[in-house]
Amino acid sequence: MIRINLLPHREAKRKARRQQFYVLLGLVSLLAAVIWFLGFSIINRQIAVQTEKDEFLKREIASLDKEIDEIKKIQEQTNALLARKRVIEALQANRTETVHLFNELSKQVPEGIYLRTLAQTGQLINISGYAQSNARINTLMNNLDESPLLERSTLVETKAETVVGRRLNSFSITTVISRQTTAAASPPQGKK
């Protein structure tokens, strides 16, 4: 019988399998390292892109904040100009008010009444003076109430006084001036 020694053959197969295992282990390790490197590179690239987007957004937000500040300044200037315009329009609408008031008072003050002071606070007008009798004060108040420019006349006080040797009645009246609107104050424009 022939005797074959299989031990070296088995040893060679084991050695070949071991080498194959180490080669496969090396390839798998290399493949894992390549996959890890690719993943790391892709994630770092995405982080860099996102950081770049964030920086772009920060720059745009800063420029928009500047524009918003400019818009607020322009709105404040616009509001200030509109307030000035309203004041000027109010002054324009009521600029002849004093002339109309004195004209109306000259028409409505009856004989025997002497005006001493005339003071205006807003729409309220305080009139004080002397009258020859209480009936003339009553006539003055009725005339003021019938006036298209004045309304709500109220007698504050009346008292008898001696002025330069004459006995007169001192009085104080408050009345309200009715504001004329620009549409009512301007004459109709149809005929010239």
Image (spheres, rainbow, N blue to C red):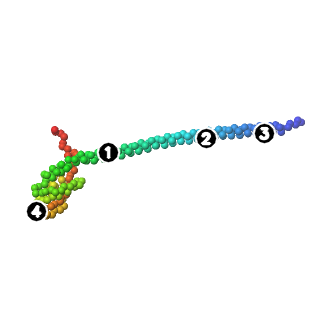
Quadrant showing the N terminus: top right
What's the residue type where badge 1 is placed? Leu
Circle 1 residues within 10 Å: few <14, some 14–19, many ≥20: few
Does label 3 or label 1 sit earlier along the sequence?
Answer: 3
The structure residue drawn at horizontal position 78% and vertical position 39%, both measured from the top left corner, is 14
Quadrant showing the C terminus: top left
Q: Is 9 in front, or is 130?
A: 130
Instruction: Please identify, in this view, whether the residue under mark 3 or under mark 1 is nearer the observer.
Output: 1
Mark 2 to mark 3 CA distance (whole Å)? 38 Å
Q: Which residue is mark 3?
A: 14
The structure residue drawn at horizontal position 35% and vertical position 45%, both measured from the top left corner, is 77
The structure residue drawn at horizontal position 20% and vertical position 46%, both measured from the top left corner, is 185
Q: What is the number of the mark on residue 165?
A: 4
Mark 4 to mark 2 CA distance (whole Å)? 114 Å
Q: What is the number of the mark on residue 30?
A: none
Does label 4 or label 3 sit earlier along the sequence?
Answer: 3
Q: Which residue is mark 1?
A: 81
The structure residue drawn at horizontal position 61% and vertical position 41%, both measured from the top left corner, is 40
Q: Is 149 in front, or is 94?
A: 94
Q: Which residue is mark 2?
A: 40
Does label 2 or label 1 sit earlier along the sequence?
Answer: 2
Residue 176, position in %: x, y?
A: 20, 55
